[in-house]
Image (spheres, rainbow, N blue to C red):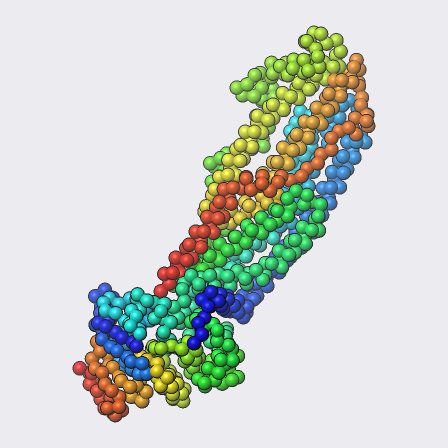
Amino acid sequence: MAEVNPRRSRHSMLGTLIQKELREISRNGSLRIVGVAVFGLLLVTLGLGLREARAVRAERYAAQKVADGHFRTQDDKNPHVAAHYGTYVFKPAGALSFVNPGVDAFVGVSLKLEAHKRNRLEGARARDGTALARFSRLSVASVLELLVPILVVAMGFAAWTAERERGTLRQLKSLGVEPRSLLVGKLLGLLLALAALLIPAFALCVVGVSVFGGALEVGGWGRLFALVLVYGSYVVLWANLTLWASARAKSSRGALVTLLGIWVSVSLIVPRVATDIAMVLSRVPSEAVLSARVKASLNEGVPGGTAREARVNEFSEKLLLQYGFKGAETLMDASLLNGLELQAEALFENEVLDHHYAELGAALDRQERLEQVLGVLSPVIVARSLSMALAGTDAAHHRQFSDRAEIHRRALVDLLNREFAEKGGTRGFDYKAGKELWEKAPKFAYSPPALQWVLGRQFPSLVLLVCWLVVSALLAYRAVARLEVA
Amino acid sequence: MLHAEGLRKQYGEVVALHGLDLMVKEGELFCLLGANGAGKTTTIQLFLGFIRPSAGAARIAGLNVVEHPLQTKALLAYIPENVMLYPNLTGLENLRFFTTLAGKGELQDTELLSMLSRVGLAAEAVNRRVGTYSKGMRQKVGIAMAMAKNAKALLLDEPTSGLDPKASNEFSALLRRLRDDGVAILMATHDIFRSKQDGDRVGIMKEGRLVAIHTTSELSHADLERVYLDHMHH
């Protein structure tokens, strides 16, 4: 008899194992129904997400245009008064917000920029909906994170138990097929069946991103690719867990109950508990507390620092030197003095705000890091954290937007105060600037941070995703290697 | 071809098999007769490597099944009481699947169809899902698998139990054909009639011991039945 090329034979075995799994899955009526239901849901959430994201994008673009228009066409007025009137900036919708809207709906989208104050984002869409809307919101991300694992479980919970119950495992073992080959065949068969459902959805995502076009200036495609890798790994690790539970269970019913128990724990219970643990272990001041602390520091100076009057004077002296004066007594122009004092006060206010917002940012960072680390207890936490970050809809992106807006606010206020100081002359607060100045004001242009920034912040989640993948694969392999037929 | 040397299996205090010594040659059909719990299935499982012996060795073509699991399994085919196949696959797909896993992926569909035809599976059945097959049809697919694999030894565990007489006769004819082709066959069974008709030798097992071996050509059906019942009652 002719010798069979071992490499060719091995490939043929793997192909046969995969083909058999695909046939079994595709010929199972119940699985077809569940698969079509999840696929349909994925399409619906994709369509709705895209429609909403496009509407939001257009809405915010229009609102920004109106706000810019108002600022540029405002009446003549004193520059510092104009700084008090301020302007608004709107956070543009992220290119992938249709995949994962994240915390977008809860943190607000618009920010009022004005003198002396660092405001918080306003206009959270959740406030416009009913309480029920908070719980029934479905997105592509929630389908992928919560429902696709159920589909994986439905497809794979009986992968080994059915072999044992039917007696085919005995038949396979009698052929001397290596457990590793069987595992790889079952895993790839399961994943290919899932890919048949998920790849069209991914293709629609690509179309969606293309439709969004302009919103992808900074790393949009890179983010989408990373998101696909994250969800791909997430599906693989669920497939591993499913095959592990199936190999360990005594019966198909036992495997199903075990897997549903795991799903409920890691999808519903652990994320909730992890959030509470993170909040307890790393407390973040409430908005009211933060406002009170800022107010106190604005009146008295930052805790442990120089008192307000002394610090403002220090800034004034520096500014006088910048303008070429030796001291306030040499300054005969009251308006220039007013202008410089306003600038000095703004610098002091900035220092106070920097102090408190740095503390807030550090506390939020600690809390987020802790939440990420708690992903060791649930792959859902890991996938959710990475997904929101890559979609640009997590709290860190909102803070980054807020920080950019604050830089813009300071530049705007500084421009207006300098104008007042330099051109107010003897008119003092009666001095009015006009269109020429408003036109000179910098335009706020926000672009999301680069992919590297996201990956850097999400490093713990990335490490945990790899750990979940490796550990689940090892668990599945060990369980399959120990499968008993007798 | 099949050789048990002092083969023993013990579960805690319970001894399922007491030092079995047995040799089945190429082209021989050896039937193991005995009541439930006599140690027939344990013997088959030890040859298959599903369980490890407490002492002694099971050898196939001189190779110890514990030390050479893959090589010995490549020489073996196994047909249990119910040949278990994938109900959502057709007979041909099942045969293709198992023969490929057995390392015979080079076989063409025409060859597999020919084997299914030789074992008597109706042409209309080969592309039907196995979920609709009778037990006899599944057993035929099992024989086709052994043929496709070109097995040197065949282990059968109560293969005709529950088959109607016609199916049972067809199955026996297939076994004899394999035996005539040089395959060593070890069949555990309750069926005294089939043992006499198909077997070259018959071993009677009782409480984990091989208590007697007879050459079937030297006994009538009635003699074999009497010998068997004598052993069972003493």
Q: Identify whether A276 is placed above or below B172.
A: above
Query: Which residue is located at x 71 percent, y 45 percent?
Result: A214
- Residue A288 place in picture, x, y as percent: 58, 30
Q: Nearer the viewer, residue B192 or A50?
A: B192
Query: Which residue is located at x 23 percent, y 91 percent?
Result: B218
The number of numbered discs placed on residues in the rendered structure image is 0
Q: Identify whether A309 is placed above or below A6.
A: above
Query: The N terminus of chain A lies in which quarter of the figure?
Result: bottom left
- Residue B44 place in picture, x, y as percent: 31, 74
Q: Is residue A8 left or right of residue A40?
A: left
Query: The C terminus of chain A lies in which quarter of the figure?
Result: bottom left
Query: Which residue is located at x 48 percent, y 73 percent?
Result: B106
- Residue B52 place in picture, x, y as percent: 29, 66
Q: Identify whether B212 is placed above or below A332.
A: below
Q: Nearer the viewer, residue A123 or B162?
A: B162
Which image quadrant for residue A251? Answer: bottom left
| Residue A394 in view (yes/no) | no
Q: Residue furthest top?
A: A329
Q: Is residue A247 left or right of residue A359?
A: left
- Residue A154 place in picture, x, y as percent: 50, 62
Query: Which residue is located at x 76 percent, y 34 percent?
Result: A68
| Residue A12 in view (yes/no) | yes
Q: Residue furthest front?
A: A2
Q: Nearer the viewer, residue A140 or A300?
A: A140
Q: Residue furthest left?
A: B234
Q: Identify whether A380 is placed above or below B218.
A: above
